[in-house]
Image (tube, helix red, strand yellow):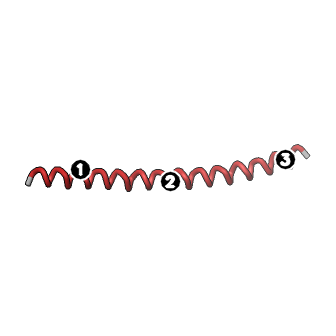
Amino acid sequence: MKKKKKKKKNICLRGDYAEFSSLHSAQLLLRNICWELISWTLNWEMQKDYK
């Protein structure tokens, strides 16, 4: 019985890890988009000031 429980736990952990890694990649993607927007805005502000 103990061995069966361990197997189930491993599957659950694997599922949680997959979920976590997908969440993590989504966060990284969002962060990249935010940085793109920030840098683009900064560049635009600088160009505006330059003109």
Q: Are marks 1 and 2 in contact (CB under 8 Å)?
A: no
Left of 40 or right of it: where is 21? right
Q: Amino acid at mark 3?
A: Lys
| Whole-percent x, y for residue 30 in the image | 43, 54
Q: Residue at x 80, y 49 (%)?
A: 7
- Mark 2: secondary structure: helix
Left of 43 or right of it: where is 2? right
- The earlier-in-sequence mark between 1 and 3 is 3
Quadrant of res 36 = bottom left
Position of the C terminus, as image quadrant, is: bottom left
Q: Residue furthest left?
A: 51
- The earlier-in-sequence mark between 1 and 2 is 2
Near-viewer residue (36 or 1): 36
Mark 1, mark 2: which one is toward the viewer?
A: 1
Q: Amino acid at mark 1?
A: Leu
- Mark 3: secondary structure: helix
Mark 1, mark 3: which one is toward the viewer?
A: 1
- Mark 1: secondary structure: helix
| Whole-percent x, y for residue 18 in the image | 62, 54
Q: CA distance from mark 1 to mark 3?
A: 55 Å
Q: Residues within 10 Å of mark 1 (few under 14, many from 20)?
A: few
Q: Which residue is mark 2?
A: 25
Q: Which residue is mark 3?
A: 5
- The earlier-in-sequence mark between 3 and 2 is 3
Q: Amino acid at mark 2?
A: Ser
Q: CA distance from mark 3 to mark 2?
A: 30 Å
Q: Which residue is mark 1?
A: 42
| Whole-percent x, y for residue 16 in the image | 66, 51
Q: Residue at x 23, y 50 (%)?
A: 42
Left of 38 or right of it: where is 25? right
